[in-house]
Image (cartoon, grey):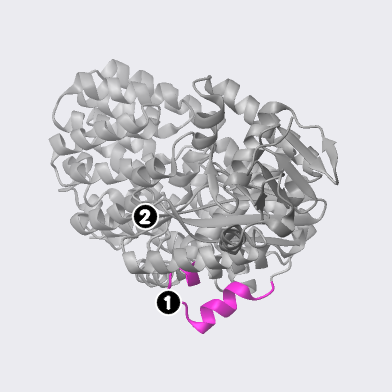
Amino acid sequence: MASQRGSIVRFDDFEMDLHAGELRKGGQVVSLPPQPFKVLSLLVRRTGELVTRDEIRQEIWGDQTAVDFERGLNFAINKIRSALGESAEAARYVETLPRRGYRFLRPVETAPESLPAETIPVETVQRRKRRLIPALGGGLVLLLLGGYLGAQYWRASGRIRSIAVLPFENLSHDAADDYLADGTTEALITDLGRVSTLPVTSKTSSGRYRKSAKTLTEIARELKAGAIVEGAVLRSGDRLRVSVQLIDAGADRQIWSDSYDRRLGDVLTLQGEIAAAIAEAIRARVTPEQKLELTRPRPVNPEAYQLYVRGRFFWNKATADGSRRAIADFEQALTFDPHFALAYAGLADAYAGLPVFLGTPAAEAYSKAKKAADRALAIDPNLVEAVNVLAEVAEYSWNWREAERLFQRVFRMNPSYAQAYHDYGFYLIAMGRVKDATLWTEKACMLDPLSVYYASDLALDPYLLRDYEEAIRQLNRVLAMDPQYATTHLYLALPYAAKRDYDRAIASAQKSFELDSENPFNLSTLAYVYGQAGKLGAARQTLERLTGMSRRQPVSAFHFGLAYLGMGDHERAINSFLKAYEERFYVLILMKTMPAFDPLRADPRFQELLSRMGIL
């Protein structure tokens, strides 16, 4: 069948007859099924442009189910790569843009088969030249020109106020490399937070969009982010390939993109280079010292690094089991590289969380945390995670002046480090400055808008200010985010009890215990609200269960004090809180403002306790 005029397109050694549905190389037909051929023809007709997954679906798959479309598209792309002799790892023709779509990378010529090349009209040649400009190299000219124009457009618009880094996609077939993609995401968030003049959304929130079907516009709206960073990681042996792009989410326009190929041992250096490039694209005010720090060589043992990023994965779970596994991975990483500062910083974070997740005595946990943080900073003074741990240790050791100094240092090092804003909020609560604390915790929530951990603690502030109705309203809004988060139910029991709405207080405390039966807070709070409700038999039974728990795991004297307080046994409550002081139990810093302790405020021993803590 003769081809119609304009139905032949050529790139490199290939020729596509769009009318006949044939792909040829050197005159020989290359096998390519009809559906993949349609996909390739669509990409080729728009060479150099992003063709979104939705556009491909609408033009080729129509109203077929999402499952059929995904299966068909994956099959088509694989067949195209096979026909063109390329792989995803070394794409020369079809570039994958994770979550978005595909781009054809090579220059394309259009010519009618019935006319020899030398008789093509002049206007056709001129059109071809114009078309070649955006397509040259599929990469270099397009990348530089598109990135430059995108950046200029973005700079002119001035509407981007914050950045979110979405979880990088793992393009290898090895699930173990998921940790590598996670590590790249987290490191980029940290490095960008240090130099960006814009807030950078925390990983806790952006991490919820892994493999999300939502559009970038939807994600940006939910995260309140104007720009989105997304990328992909591919490991092959000891080589690492990372592709990354910065998108203006409002205009769905690419601001900047690039790809990198490095040895796995250079991954830390690479992460800094990417952060520096993005900072330049958004015109962040990066000092020469910051740029030097970001781009300085930071070689790392590959085995140690992979153990470290796996440890961070488990630590981010914020559970007892996650803490145990994180510590094991960080310690093993240090066997491969005893001078790996990030592994020491990871250990410091994990140790600091042990009083919360495992009930480890605070003095023991904070001593280990401080030692690990000091070791990390001796190797690398710029690790914000380690400085924040030292601030936490100072805070919960009642060393308030040192805590203030260290928190201010953290804010200078990384203005987007959400955990520091949250922790500083608790510092201000200890000082009796609850309204100020609310402002700082709100900053943590702005940086991590989907974190129920921060949102619950923020909703606790009205309770501390004796506005119980507002506390209940806010905590119920947090429950709508995650009904299975035990701490929110635990917090709800307190304002309900303060209002003498004991049925709801008991129900909330019971729910928190059902969701997390290993946390002594849930039992001690349940005993407290039973006692407040006058159900002393149930309170004593719960206290016995708490005693039984203490035989299986560490339980602070604070929990027994809270149970006694609810039952009206103020003598035993005071004695228990004095023991908790010796333990350096961290929740004692709430005693100055927390309404539950109001019955003890006239007791001289309670005032002495606050004085010894330095918060009277």
Residue at x-position 16% and y-position 47%: 465
Query: Label 2: which residue?
Result: 226
Pair 2/1: label in front: 2
Query: Is residue 496 in view?
Result: yes
The magenta stretch spans which residues? Answer: 278-297
Quadrant of the rendering where the C terminus is positioned? bottom left
Depicted 597 relative to depicted 530: above or below: below
Mark 2: few, some, or many residues within 10 Å (few <14, many ≥20)? many
Amino acid type indicated by mark 1: Arg
Q: Is residue 329 left or right of residue 162?
A: right
Residue at x-position 32% and y-position 40%: 456
Mark 1: few, some, or many residues within 10 Å (few <14, many ≥20)? few
Query: Which disc, if any, is residue 373?
Result: none
Q: Mainly helix, strand or loop, the magenta region?
A: helix
Residue at x-position 72% and y-position 67%: 339
Query: Label 1: which residue?
Result: 285
Whether residue 34 is in magenta: the answer is: no
Depicted 465 relative to depicted 195: above or below: above
Query: Is residue 534 in view?
Result: no
Amino acid type indicated by mark 2: Gly
